[in-house]
Image (cartoon, helix red, strand yellow):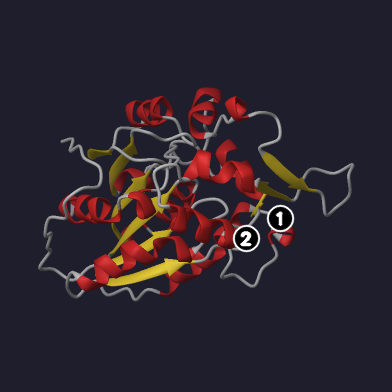
Amino acid sequence: MEAAGGGGEVHKASNDKEEHFVLVHGAGHGAWCWFKLACLLRGSGRHRVSCVDLAGAAGSLVDPDDVRSFDEYDAPLLDLMAALPDDGRKVVLVGHSAGGLSVTHAMHLFRDKIKQAIFVAATMLPFGYQSEQDIKDGAPDLSEFGDDVYDLKFSLGDDRPPTSVALREEHQRAILYQQCTHEDSTLASILLRPWPAALGAARFGFGRADDGAVNTVRRVYVKTANDRMLKPEQQEAMVRRWPPSEVAAMDTDHSPFFSAPERLFELIIKSL
């Protein structure tokens, strides 16, 4: 079932059942990027919201250059999931952009604690081995913006692989926030951080192939039609190769939590 829409008029959405939403940010972002959606979810009823800062994010005490593996990067999310009580109550995971990789990681380890996983303009690749085409579809291609889009840091030495990656400030609005207000994109430029280079390795497989655990969790994909970071055709290709239970569409940029938070809220509630 596919729904379309962008910002516009806010329609009241409700869900009588209390849910626990765990919101997982993408590369360079942090728990801060969810502040509008978190307010909407909390204000709509009795919903509980946990916004995670992955290792190296603005709210993390970890230096992104010190993160050496995807497990280290995801540790805050995995620790949160491990601490949830085994009482039958399940969480709804929401992942944005590269946060989709972290969501799939959690699905692999904690499937019995997850009611549903929602991928918002997110990398949605099968857990374990990925083909070259999977990796191409899941990795941003920003070549149209020139050769100087990223800043790389080599904290282990210039002869070693980079330890962190950052999107240069002059490209941030054009790539991530072109439909957001200038106030929101200015806030983001202050709070964005470099992300651990170890995150990129996750796209090349971070578990055994043909893992059945992730397929027991219901998945929803939210497409963003005007996305310049993860192109619509890349999103479509990932949806085709690993079909979710439901697909919704938004007429937004890569960051609907800023550009159309009310519409994103509605789609999330309706998907439950």
Task: Provide the residue designation for mark 1.
Answer: 68
Going by the numbered disc 1, the residue's amino acid type is Arg
Front-most of residues 244 and 163: 163
Q: Position of residue 210 (x, y in %)?
A: 44, 36
Please give the name of the residue rendered at 42% of the width and 42% of the height, measured from the top-left corner: 254
Cα gap from disc 1 to disc 2, whole angstroms:
7 Å
Please give the name of the residue rendered at 47% of the width and 34% of the height, measured from the top-left corner: 228
For residue 72, which numbered disc appears in the image? 2
Q: Position of residue 190 (x, y in %)?
A: 58, 61
Picture quadrant where residue 236 is located = top left
- At mark 2, the secondary structure is helix
Please give the name of the residue rendered at 34% of the width and 64% of the height, measured from the top-left corner: 36
**Residue 253 vertical position relative to residue 64 in the rendered view, above or below:** above
Q: Residues within 10 Å of mark 2 (few under 14, many from 20)?
A: some
Q: Residues within 10 Å of mark 1 (few under 14, many from 20)?
A: some
Q: Position of residue 172 (x, y in %)?
A: 56, 45
**Residue 177 vertical position relative to residue 90 in the rendered view, above or below:** above
- At mark 1, the secondary structure is loop
Q: Position of residue 80 (x, y in %)?
A: 45, 70
Please give the name of the residue rendered at 53% of the width and 67% of the height, measured from the top-left corner: 76
Front-most of residues 175 and 76: 175
- Left or right of 30: which side holds 86? left
Picture quadrant where residue 83 is located = bottom left
Going by the numbered disc 2, the residue's amino acid type is Glu
* Residue 27 can be seen in this image: yes
> Dots 1 and 2: beta carbons under 8 Å?
yes
Q: Residue furthest front?
A: 182
